[in-house]
Amino acid sequence: MKWAYFIFIGSMIFTVLCIILFITIPGFPLFIFFFLPPIYCWGYKAQSDSDSYSVPKCPHCGKALLYGKTRFCPHCGKAL
């Protein structure tokens, strides 16, 4: 998602700006930690696209077997 990249880049720019202002201006509020959570968006798509769970697949057609233990593939009909 493009909005996740924009949020990530914007929060990083704002974080660096707040750190610079905190160092240069005495008493500047350091509230950058409220803008750091969008970093989670950076890995969100990679996390959703990953195959973290294993689904058994047919060795012939490659489609997912959703019915547990079967002897034949419901898609191509070949024996497993």
Image (cartoon, rainbow, N blue to C red):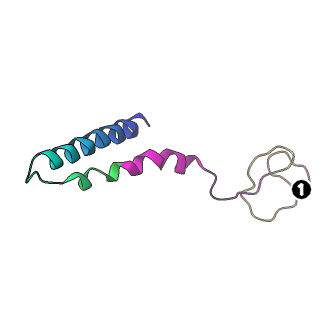
Q: Which residues are magenta?
A: 39-57
46 falls in the magenta region? yes
Residue 7, above or below 37: above
Q: Is residue 68 left or right of residue 18?
A: right
Quarter of image, res 30: bottom left
Q: Residue at x 31, y 51 (%)?
A: 36
Q: Residue at x 32, y 42 (%)?
A: 12
Q: Residue at x 27, y 43 (%)?
A: 16
Give the amino acid at mark 1. Leu
List the residue tagged with mark 1: 80
Q: Residue 75: x, y in percent? A: 80, 46
Q: Residue lying furthest left in this view?
A: 27
Label 1: which secondary element: loop
Q: Residue lying furthest bottom in this view?
A: 69
Q: Nearer the viewer, residue 7 or 51?
A: 7
> In which quadrant is the N terminus drawn?
top left
> In which quadrant is the C terminus drawn?
bottom right
